Image (cartoon, rainbow, N blue to C red):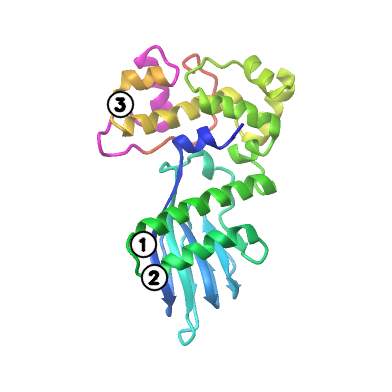
């Protein structure tokens, strides 16, 4: 069982490289997701509302959800950097971003498994070969997956879907929902897949994920629905694909979770649902 396969099929992390080279002056970065790789030099990270941090060795700095920050360097020495903006599935409040810390710091000396990818990244970043932009973006995409995998395996995240995927029993139930959102899942179904009692499963799921299993299923369905609508699929078809026999019932739930009416966009993407706690509703 690959617990990431169905999740990444709908909320795949994406990166877009925008800087490679030597940074020689203070630069401020906006409030969007970022992944920076410090190759060489000394770097001071200045965070809005946080303490300054100093780095002088190869290090990955990951801002999952976005946070305004600046880099200050010694202008005479500078710092060699490769930087990318990040979208964790292209939707605000997407499942991957839930529970991640505001900043993930990964020194390569402590995480040697990341070194081969970073070496490839640097080889592309400081060259002028054809296809450089595409190669950098795909390498950053792969780094994002490695970072998410590390977060799950290390138990760094206490709540959210990544915390649930770190639990072997909850991961089975989560994967079932991710793979088949249209199925009319019940608490008995899901607890049976997890190999737990109904009560124990419900308690542990809410503690680790931060929502009841059925509430999570509802929001996951709307996450999938956003992706399908963004591809231009009609509302009625999307409703069926995420488990609603009635387009009207689907529309009510979609509006309640996302705060907007469902519509296919044929080129313009919809913003995804926020992972919020939902009260019980027969429309689920």
The correct choice, above or below, for 169 with respect to 89 in the image is above
Q: What SS does tag 2 mark?
A: loop
Query: Quadrant of residue 83 in the image?
Result: bottom left
- Residue 245 painted magenta: yes
* Residue nearest the viewer, comparing 5 with 241: 5
**84 versus 267 height, above or below:** below
Q: Residue at x 56, y 54 (%)?
A: 102
- In the image, what residue occupies the spot 63% across and 16% down? 189
How many neighbours does mark 3 have within 10 angstroms: few (below 14), some (14-19), or many (20 or more)? Answer: some
Closer to the chain start, of discs 3 and 1, is 1
**Marks 3 and 1, Cα distance to the nearest angstrom?**
34 Å
Instruction: Please rate how many residues cluster around mark 2, counting C-alpha atoms within 10 Å: few if below 14, some from 14 to 19, many from 20.
Output: few
Residue contact between numbered discs 1 and 2, judged by CB atoms under 8 Å: yes
Q: SS class of the residue under badge 3?
A: loop
The magenta span reads 242-270
- Residue extending farthest to the top is 245
In this figure, which residue is indicated by the disc labeled 3? 233
Q: Is residue 34 magenta?
A: no
Q: Which mark is residue 127?
A: 2
Q: Nearer the viewer, mark 2 or mark 3?
A: 2
Q: Which residue is mark 1?
A: 132
Give the Cα distance between marks 2 and 3.
41 Å
Mark 1 or mark 2, which has the lower sequence index? 2
Looking at the image, tell me whether mark 2 or mark 3 is earlier in sequence order: 2
As drawn, the residue found furthest toward the left would be: 266
Give how far across and how far down residue 139 sits, in percent: 46, 56
Residue 158 visible in the picture: yes
217 vs 127: above or below: above
- Residue drawn at x 55%, y 63% as measured from the top left: 60
């Amino acid at each position: 069982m690959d617990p990431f396969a169905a999740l990444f099929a709908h909320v795949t992390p994406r990166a877009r490289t925008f800087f490679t080279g030597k940074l020689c002056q203070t630069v401020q970065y906006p409030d969007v997701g970022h992944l920076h790789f410090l190759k060489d030099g000394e770097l001071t990270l200045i965070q809005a509302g946080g303490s300054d941090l100093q780095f002088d060795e190869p290090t990955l700095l990951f801002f999952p959800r976005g946070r305004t920050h600046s880099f200050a360097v010694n202008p005479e020495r500078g710092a060699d950097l490769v930087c990318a903006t990040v979208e964790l599935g292209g939707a605000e409040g997407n499942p991957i971003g839930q529970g991640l810390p505001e900043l993930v710091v990964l020194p390569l000396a402590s995480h040697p498994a990341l070194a081969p990818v970073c070496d490839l990244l640097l080889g592309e970043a400081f060259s002028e070969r054809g296809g450089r932009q595409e190669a950098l973006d795909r390498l950053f995409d792969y780094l994002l997956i490695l970072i998410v995998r590390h977060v799950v395996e290390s138990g760094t995240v206490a709540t959210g879907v990544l915390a649930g995927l770190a639990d072997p029993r909850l991961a089975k139930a989560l994967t079932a929902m991710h793979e088949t959102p249209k199925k009319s899942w019940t608490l008995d179904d899901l607890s049976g897949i997890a190999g737990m009692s109904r009560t124990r499963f419900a308690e542990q799921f809410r503690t680790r994920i931060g929502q009841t299993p059925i509430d999570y299923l509802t929001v996951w369905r709307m996450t999938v629905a956003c992706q399908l609508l963004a591809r231009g699929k009609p509302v009625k078809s999307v409703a069926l694909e995420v488990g609603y026999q009635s387009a009207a019932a689907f529309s009510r739930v979609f509006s309640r979770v996302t705060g907007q009416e469902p519509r296919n966009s044929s080129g313009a993407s919809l913003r995804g649902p926020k992972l919020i706690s939902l009260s019980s509703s027969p429309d689920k």
